[in-house]
Amino acid sequence: MRSFLAIRLYVLILAVTLLVSSCGSGGRNNSQTPPISVTTNASRLLPSPTALVTLSSPTPEVVPTPKQQLMQPSPTAISEPTPIEQVNSRYIVDVRKVNRIIGRGKVRYFFSRPDIKPPNVTVRASSKSMAYGYIFIAPKKGPGQSGPMIVDNQGEVVWFLPMRAGKRVLDFKVQNYKGNPVLTWWEGALDMKLGSGKGDFVIMNMHYKEIARVKAGNGYYGDLHEFLITPEGTALFLIYHPVTKDLSDLGGVKNTHVIDGIVQEVDIESGRVLFEWHSLDHVGLDESYIPVPKNSGQRYDYFHANSIALDKDGNLLVSARHTWAAYKIDRDTGNIIWRLGGKKSDFTFESKAKFAYQHDVRRQPDGTITLFDNVADSRKNGKSRGLVLRVDEQSKRVELVKEYIHPDRILSMTQGNMQILSNGHVFIGWGSEPFFSEFDQEGNLLFDAQLPTSYDNYRSYRFEWSGEPESAPRIAAQRNRSQDKVTIYVSWNGATSVHNWEVLAGNTPGSLMSLGVSPKMGFETAILLKTNKQYFAVRALDENGNVIGKSSVVKITNMGRD
């Protein structure tokens, strides 16, 4: 009897065990697994459930040259995930912005992008009242790399394209071409003594892909000072061309190389020259404030054109630094309609409206003319300023509407610009002095930043911009000395829509699993992980949690600090 009862009890226990096992496998893990916790409180930033990700075999991380960076195909992409059980983001220990500065505090360094070393930007003042948009500069003459550079209001790099040795970039800005916003700049070799250059003009789309390169026609080279795209799809720019002249009658010598300031307009698609104007045909040497050279073979830059703008009637406004004047030029005949400033001015000025060695003369929609006045009074006591002038073309009278002066009374001997923003604020680049600033309409300083002292920057702008790079995000990984922690460094040069990074890790390239989501911080985000995994990748997420980019897979290659 006891044997019979024991057998029945054993069978009952076995049946219960099998029943519990079958039920548990169908729901216990799914109901008890905690959700992925993230480093932000916004639920919309949660990643998709932790995934097993299949990837191809890893390839060594190769640092591209700047040109390759624009043209290379995207690295091996992460395939769409297959959901498995979730993990907790306890793996993410810390997140911070990488702010490593080398070169005696002048150059930024990024672990995920060691090939780019932009200058460090220091923000000295900021305000919630600043206009929306990024800042566009092209630093040069410093210890780091030079090239077109976009930064945000914190001075963080958004996009940087380093130039190869001997190449420089100037007049980096946003323009419209064929109905789309594009990046444009001059690229070439500088002539530092003359303050000019020989090069081409680059047009790049929102994917940072070059879509056009404009060259000067008629055997000339494009100068650095201006590149203006017109609504008709043409480009206006300047050319500096030496012409040998005998200046004996002016107290000079024979065989002097006088620089002819040329304005040229070409069709961007065909390269056909549509208009060409020469200063030597219309502006005499006697208008210059630069002394005639006394030695044979010297160059005489009597005119020094530095900006072109379209006037409201379609004619041209051309600024010439060395005659202290702006010229309104008939776009059909090339004749000078009037001179604003200089020795032969067609206008009279109230005393505070006078300017000298100016840059960036523009007509504004309200009819005023703006410019950057490098030296208003004298080189000894002067201060550079942005000017808004009321120019009465009937009475030929010029009055000062507003001036914008830096609180430090900056005197910029060369270069500089003044931009009127859509909200009425004024953005000023201080040229040879490494500062750029934003003012409200009353002249109050809202934003002020600077490059390291050894740099200068021809012009500075603020524009709205949306960048979607064709290249993939970049990642580097370091095993910390404690062995159970890893720091990954993540960046995506030029991407403006990244809000978060989803971190993937595994022991093989084909078994990556999500460890959670980290907010994007600065150009390069450092994410400290508690894990002993060997392979890592990231996915870039926009503000709605959509995947907009995927990195290649990297393996830990070196030791870092705790």
Image (cartoon, helix red, strand yellow):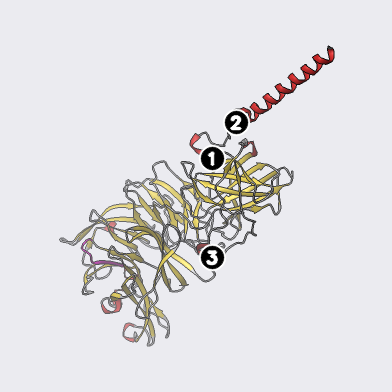
Give the mark, 1 or 3, whose residue is nearer the N terminus. Answer: 1
Crowdedness near tag 1: few (<14), some (14–19) or many (≥20) residues, C-alpha within 10 Å: some
Crowdedness near tag 2: few (<14), some (14–19) or many (≥20) residues, C-alpha within 10 Å: few
Looking at the picture, which amino acid does disc 1 mark?
Answer: Ser
Q: Is residue 141 left or right of residue 537?
A: left
Q: Residue furthest left?
A: 394
Labels 2, 3: front one: 2
The residues tagged by marks 2 and 1 sit, at their Cα atoms, a distance apart of 15 Å
Image spot of residue 376 (x, y percent): 34, 60
Q: Which residue is mark 2?
A: 30
Image spot of residue 257 (x, y percent): 39, 82
Q: Which mark is residue 337?
A: none
**Secondary structure under the numbered disc 2 in the rendered image:** helix
Labels 1, 3: front one: 1
Image spot of residue 252 (x, y percent): 36, 83
Labels 2, 1: front one: 2
**Secondary structure under the numbered disc 3 in the rendered image:** helix
Q: Which residue is mark 1?
A: 48
Looking at the picture, which amino acid does disc 3 mark?
Answer: Gln
The stretch of residues the image draws in magenta is 312-319
Q: Which residue is mark 3?
A: 68
Q: Is residue 127 magenta?
A: no
* Picture layout, residue 308 above or below residue 20: below
Q: Quadrant of residue 364?
A: bottom left
Looking at the picture, which amino acid does disc 2 mark?
Answer: Asn
